[in-house]
Image (cartoon, rainbow, N blue to C red):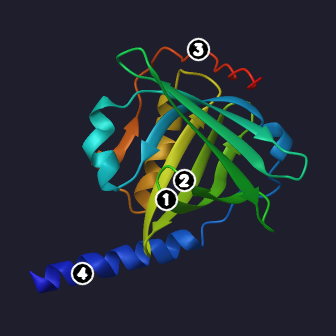
Amino acid sequence: MTTTVLRMLTALTCVLAACANIMPVPDFSLEKVAGKWYMAGFATNAQWFVNRKATMKMGTATMVPTDIGDLDLSYATLNADGTCWRMTHMAKKTDTPGRFTFHSQAWNNDNDMRFVDIVYDNYAVVHTIKTKDGVSEILNKLYSRSSEISDDLQQKFTQFSLDTGILAENIVIFPPNSECPEATAAPAPQ
């Protein structure tokens, strides 16, 4: 048992060390990444995902560059009961174009996010190292400009995720889903 646990920890350490060296795409364009994307796929060995992946569906993400080079991220997914799950993050630019960092208030973790493959009018693969209480996990996301995901793109995302240590059963292309209505701002207090 101890040997098995040590082997798993060694493998995880190797995967995380390799993932720390994954670089963003060269010539990343903050302006071209702007706009609406579909959250088409997730890949992670994190327990929260393993427990929920069977019920997850496609959602939308809006990426808005700021004047200082940060990236405002807004996510929305329509739940089965008609309510919408929403989350926002302000991803701070780093010295490396295409790499951003942010702290998630909702999950209380630090995120190192990299755009590792992108065709701006088609898809983006984003690799994130999430760290909480000294423990790091990998989350790969597939974004698409369309809700229809080609077989080639699914295979590309799957292979990248396998290469970053994600188990095959934890790589999911989400089924289509209706979209949440646009969020409306609450009126300012009088």
Earlier-in-chain disc, 1 versus 4? 4
Per the model, the C-alpha gap separating discs 3 and 2 is: 24 Å
Q: Residue at x 70, y 23 (%)?
A: 185
Left or right of 90, for residue 110: left
Mark 4 Cα within 10 Å, few/some/many (few <14, many 20+)? few
Mark 2 Cα within 10 Å, few/some/many (few <14, many 20+)? few
Q: Which marked residue is nearer to the observer: mark 3 or mark 2?
A: 2
> Do the CB atoms of the residues marked 1 and 2 lie less than 8 Å apart?
yes
Name the residue tied to disc 2. Answer: 105
Nearest the eye: 103 or 116 = 103
Earlier-in-chain disc, 3 versus 2? 2
Left or right of 48, for residue 40: right
| Quadrant where the C terminus is found in the figure | top right
Per the model, the C-alpha gap separating discs 1 and 4 is: 29 Å
Nearest the eye: 64 or 144 = 64
Q: Residue at x 53, y 21 (%)?
A: 148
Mark 1 Cα within 10 Å, few/some/many (few <14, many 20+)? few
Q: Position of residue 24 (x, y in %)?
A: 69, 59
Name the residue tied to disc 1. Answer: 108
Q: Secondary structure at mark 4?
A: helix
Name the residue tied to disc 3. Answer: 181
Left or right of 57, for residue 65: right
Q: Secondary structure at mark 2?
A: loop
The image quadrant of residue 135 is bottom left
Amino acid type at mark 4: Arg
Per the model, the C-alpha gap separating discs 1 and 2 is: 5 Å
Q: Secondary structure at mark 1?
A: loop
Amino acid type at mark 3: Pro
Earlier-in-chain disc, 4 versus 3? 4
